[in-house]
Amino acid sequence: MDGNLYKTVSQSKSFLFRFAGVSNCVPVTSSPGMLATALLVLLCASTSASALQARASSYNGEYGGGGGKRFSHSGYQLEGPITALRVRVNRYFIVGLQVRYGKVWSDYVGGKSGDLEEIFLHPGESVIQVSGKYKLYLRKLVFVTDKGRYLPFGKDTGTSFNALPLYPNTVLRFISGRSGSLIDAIGLHWDTYPSDCSSC
């Protein structure tokens, strides 16, 4: 093919892709190799966006002993942010837990002895720190909110822990752990506050 004709055909087949967040245009021809390169760039951009989004999530725990049956409230976070807490305590341990997500209460986990305490968060209020104590079982939990409230449950004995989210502007979204007749252990899951919660 004549050199000038080849150059003209190549130029007419060229087109520009502009990717979000990239200020330069990438020229791509319709050859298979160049299209494969364009697809690879798109895939990398998509993966980078997913990685940035995943950086809002973090986890602390488990804090406690090794017994009990596993539980997780991961599905409840879809109902909305944490809006209330029920904690059952006896003279020595955290006996049971139940958390309200949006307007839906989670399943109760733990035993039935002791006194049940219930705390409601104010609209828009979130838990930003959880500390406590354990020795084979969970003995104390303290929830700290972004409104400066300090919500303690249980007795001040055992090994201490202090859990904070890894990333800024994230809050406690759900809990997990292990339980039987008592709360054996707890895990804390942090993420961004849901922006589309009309019932909170």
Image (cartoon, helix red, strand yellow):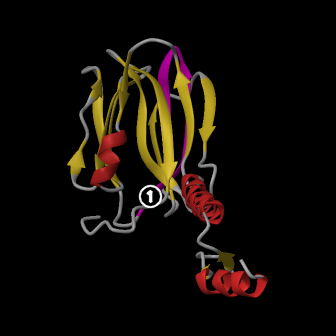
When asked about the image quadrant of residue 135, the answer is top right
Along the horizontal axis of the image, is 150 left or right of 6? left
Residue 144 visible in the picture: no
Magenta range is 125-142
> Residue 129 lies in magenta, yes or no?
yes
Magenta span dominant secondary structure: strand
Q: Is residue 142 above or below residue 194?
A: above
For the point 57% across and 62% down, the residue is 169
Q: Position of residue 149 (x, y in %)?
A: 48, 57
Along the horizontal axis of the image, is 118 left or right of 183? left
Q: Position of residue 178 (x, y in %)?
A: 41, 22
Which of 189/120 is in front? 189
Q: Is residue 184 above or below residue 81?
A: above
Which of 76/66 is in front? 76
When asked about the image quadrant of residue 112, the answer is top left
Mark 1 — residue? Answer: 126
